[in-house]
Image (cartoon, rainbow, N blue to C red):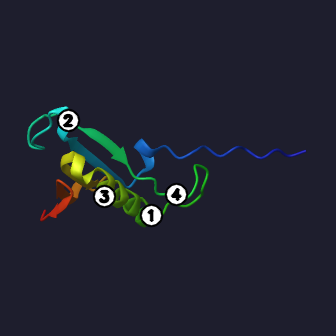
Amino acid sequence: MKTRKKRKRWNPKEHSRYKMVVYFKDKEATDPSQDDESSTFYSFDWKSGYSRFLDPQKGLEGLHKKVREYGDKANFILIYDRTTDRLIEKYFEGEPVEV
């Protein structure tokens, strides 16, 4: 009898396309150019942990939802494309700022 090999789950730190760095007001983080305390969130680009296909658009939509949730509580929110390490979006207190 042939047994199926169990697929490995996706790991957000390894496989996510986007990364969001949040500088919360209550953590004494004032400026992203300085080495302040920040929180990092990774996009979930798949429907389930065992899904075969990544959907980067789904991951970016999830991060936009977090921007709306954390906008008032944060000084700066930065979203990076992890494949190129480029800053693609920047927010100040929940409002978009030109990059």
Determine the CA span between mark 2 and mark 4: 32 Å
Does the residue at mark 2 contact the one at mark 1 (Cβ under 8 Å)? no
Q: Earlier in the sequence, mark 3 or mark 2?
A: 2
Residue type highlighted by circle 1: Lys
Question: Disc 3 versus disc 2: distance between alpha carbons?
Answer: 17 Å
Q: Is residue 83 visible?
A: no
For the point 24% across and 45% down, which residue is it?
22
Quarter of the rendering containing residue 5: top right
Could you tell me the amino acid type at mark 2? Asp
- Give the position of the N terminus as an image quadrant: top right
Precedes in sequence: disc 3 or disc 4: 4
Secondary structure at badge 2 equals: helix
Q: Which of marks 2 and 1 is in front?
A: 2
In the rendered structure, find residue 68 and report the number of the disc placed on it: 3
Camera-near label (2 vs 4) is 2
Mark 2 Cα shell of 10 Å, populated few (<14), some (14-19), many (≥20): few
User: Which residue position is annotated with label 2?
Assistant: 26
Please name the amino acid that badge 4 sits on: Trp
State left or right for residue 51 relative to residue 67.
Answer: right
- In the rendered structure, are the residues bearing label 4 and label 1 in contact, judged by CB atoms less than 8 Å apart? yes
Camera-side residue: 5 or 99? 99
Q: Mark 4 points at which residue?
A: 46
Label pair 1/3, CB-CB below 8 angstroms? no
In the rendered image, the vertical position of residue 57 relative to residue 18, given as above or below: below
Q: Residue at x 35, y 45 (%)?
A: 41
Q: 96 or 12, which lies in front? A: 96
Is residue 80 in view? yes
Residue bearing the label numbered 1: 58
